[in-house]
Image: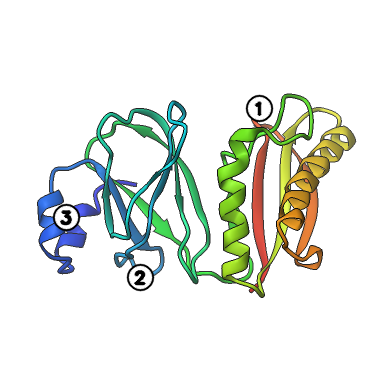
Amino acid sequence: MRGFLLVLMYWGLGASWAAAQGASGWAVIHAAKRLPVEAELVLEVPDRPKPIRSEKAAFHEVPSGVEGKVHALVLEPQFLLHSAEFEVPFLGTDTIALAPLKAGLRMELPWVQFVEASFRLDYHSLLTLEYLVQFMNLHPSSELVISCSVEGVDALECERLGRQRARSVWEFLVTEGIAPGRLSLEGRCSNEEEPRISLEVRAI
C-alpha cells in the first residue's frame, strides 16, 4: 500500500520525515489508528548472508544496493508479528501496517519454507522462526494455531502433509522453550502452488 508518506508528514513527525520526502522506503503505522509507529525493521535479502537490521524509526529507507525480493520483519510489543515480501526497488513509500494484538488475528509467514515434497524445514526459514519465538516470549500468555496449506487433489493427503509441516514448526518452537499447550496444529488443502504457513492468535 503506497501513498502514506505525505499524510504522515502532516502528523508532525519532524525533520526526519521531511528529509525522507521523495525517498523510497517503508512507513510503519498502527493499522487501526493509521498513526506512525517507531519500530525496528529487519530485512532478509537472498544474496546477503546476514539480515539488515535498522534502528527504531517510523520510516525506513531502502538500503543502497538492495534489489529483488526482500523479506521484511517487524516485531513490536502488543502488535502482531509482521512478515511480508517486497519487490525492491520501488518508487515512493510502501506501508507496513502493524495490527494491535488480539484473539482471532491471522498472520502469514511467507518465508517459512520446506524441502520439496517433504515436511522438513528449509534453512531459509530460520530467521522467521527465531522471530516467532521472540514474539511468543514477548507475549507469554499468547496461544497460536499453526496452519499449513498444501496444494493437492487428494484432500486427505494434502491435509496430512500440511499437518506434518505445521508440526515441524511446532517442534521448532517447543525445542526453543515454548510450552506445547500454547500451540495447536491444522493442515489444509489449497489452490496455491507454494505451501503457506499461517498462524491464528487463539488467545492473548
Q: Residue at x 42, y 35 (%)?
A: 70
Q: Position of residue 135 (x, y in %)?
A: 57, 62
Vertical arrangement, residue 203 with respect to residue 159, above or below? below
Q: Are marks 2 and 1 in contact (CB under 8 Å)?
A: no
Q: Which residue position holds label 3?
A: 6
In the visual, does 26 lie left or right of 177?
Answer: left
Q: Nearer the viewer, residue 134 or 119?
A: 134
- Element at badge 1? loop
Residue 105 seen anywhere in this rendered image of the structure: no
Q: Are marks 2 and 3 in contact (CB under 8 Å)?
A: no
Q: Which mark is residue 193?
A: 1
Q: Which of the image's four quarters has the C terminus?
A: bottom right
In the visual, does 144 lie left or right of 98?
Answer: right
Q: Residue at x 75, y 67 (%)?
A: 182
Q: Which residue position holds label 2?
A: 33
Classify mark 2: residues with Cα within 10 Å, few (<14), some (14-19) or many (20+).
Answer: few
Q: Position of residue 45 (x, y in %)?
A: 43, 33
Q: Position of residue 186 (x, y in %)?
A: 79, 50
Q: Earlier in the sequence, mark 2 or mark 3?
A: 3
